[in-house]
Amino acid sequence: MVFPKDFLWGGATAANQYEGGYNEGGRGLANVDVVPHGEDRYPIIAGQMKHLDFDNEHYYPAKTGVDFYHRYKEDIALIAEMGFKTFRISIAWTRIFPNGDENEPNEEGLQFYENVFKELRKHDIEPLVTITHFDMPVHLIEEYGGWRNRKLVGFYEKLVRVLFTRYKDLVTYWITFNEINMIMHLPFMGAGLVFEEGENQEEIKYIAAHHEMVASASATKIAKEINPDFQIGCMLAAGVAYPNTPDPKDVREAQIANQNSYFFVDVQSRGEYPNYALKYLERQGIEIPFEEGDKELLKENTVDYISFSYYSSKLAAHPDNLESQGKTEGNVMGTLKNPYLEASEWGWQIDPLGFRITMNEMYDRYQKPLFVVENGLGAVDTPNENGNIIDDYRIDYLQAHIQEMKNAVELDGVELIGYTTWGAIDLVSASTGEMSKRYGFVYVDRDDEGNGTLDRSKKKSFDWYKNVIESNGEDL
Ligand code: BG6
């Protein structure tokens, strides 16, 4: 048997795309609530367009998500039927502190997550909890400018103290920030950043990232004080960058692309800014506002495990060599087309071997247990004449990736805690706001305009994954 007996098989979700109930239970308004579906979405999530309220021209998919808020028992029963050992959800900050800067938390919000965790435990499912997944109170953006402001560290510390204390005996695995490197690509989602004209955007992103990394280290410290058994992880949008050709200029470009991603985990896992980053920041004239004690805090409170998402590899080329190569579409990280790879309907290139390569790179670099907390295929699912979804394409994708994950563990000796596929139950796409970009084993009746019953039904992949878990990954 390749995977240990207690290997954590499961699925992953995030409040901003899944939970809904945006104005219930005393919840405040969150950044992603006000992000519409449609062509204005991208400039908003990239921080280039200010939009902090609703209007009548747009549709806002996060308001309802797929209604986990009201249907959590039904969803948990479904994942329990599949045999999930873990389920990843995230906390909507606005349920706990509606504005983010209050002194007292909102009891109704705390009770909601307690109910969810107890329901999971009832089915022997280990909660895997992301504290911040593209999510924050709008008030913290309007009043403080989001994570560019050091004050956010204090608000975050207050949040985690409340969560760690309340769920001390219900949750073990925590993730401080989802895909922390996304701050560089989707700064509104990643850090509540909205840029003013003429600002040095790169500098602001690095400052916000510093604040998040300090907050993450501080959360790790607080966590261990409250429960030394807590396991705290960082989270990276991973996916190795290959050089486009053997031209050393392309190889160097790939190295830079990889360092740009690893930078965050280098800080969170090794506890200090790597030299290549310090030198780069210096050259750019970017000053990171280190406060007294930051260096020690980062050094002494590194993460226990490294979690990451993997959807695709990337391809890098030096600008001199770029001319002929087209870019892939629809991918927020943007990359060149790799002629050896097929792509999804949204242009995300499919590279199972790249998954094994990425796992090796990360394990070699950090020598800490890894946790795959997102992987999957966003695809259009069309019910057949009997109303069933025969999603063999999804099964093929997952099968190939799990096989490479097995190889990484069995043949390369990578230490791995678990594997959760993205969007085990269909949910709203983060990059496009669409429902039609589906990842789940469970179909949710809802379309891109918000029509549909929200009823759940099993796809073909439901039984397939159930069997994968039952056989502990032996039978793919
Ligand atoms: C990751 C995010 O980037 O990828 C998720 O953590 C997101 O929130 C997932 O949903 C898939 O991306 P998308 O854009 O297809 O929803």
Image (cartoon, rainbow, N blue to C red):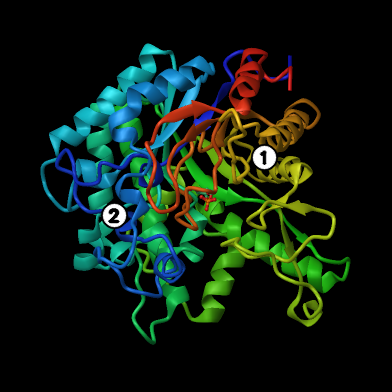
User: Neighbour class for label 2 at 10 Å: few (<14), some, many (≥20)?
Assistant: many
Q: Is mark 1 within 8 Å of ligand 1?
A: no
- Outermost residue, right side: 246
**Which residue lies at the image location 76% right of the left edge and 75% below the top edge?**
318
For residue 454, say whether it is visible: yes
Compared with 84, 22 (above or below) is below
Amino acid at the residue labelled 1: Tyr
Q: Earlier in the sequence, mark 1 or mark 2?
A: 2
Tell me the residue that label 2 is attached to: 153
Say which of 314 and 395 sits in front: 395
Tell me the residue that label 1 is attached to: 363
Residue 170 horizontal/vertical position (percent): 33, 21
How far apart marks 1 and 2 lie (CA) works out to 29 Å
* Tag 1–tag 2 contact (CB < 8 Å): no
Compared with 309, 73 (above or below) is above
Say which of 282 and 325 sits in front: 325
Q: Is residue 79 left or right of residue 401?
A: left
Task: Determine which quarter of the picture holds residue 196.
Answer: bottom left
Residue 467 horizontal/vertical position (percent): 65, 16
User: Neighbour class for label 1 at 10 Å: few (<14), some, many (≥20)?
Assistant: many
Compared with 13, 76 (above or below) is above
**Which residue lies at the image location 66% right of the left edge and 59% below the top edge?**
258
Quadrant containing the N terminus in the rendered view: top right
- Outermost residue, front side: 385
Q: Considering the numbered disc 1 on the image, is that residue within a helix, a strand or a loop?
A: helix
Q: Considering the numbered disc 2 on the image, is that residue within a helix, a strand or a loop?
A: helix
Compared with 159, 69 (above or below) is above
Task: Determine which quarter of the picture holds residue 122.
Answer: top left
Residue 247 horizontal/vertical position (percent): 87, 71
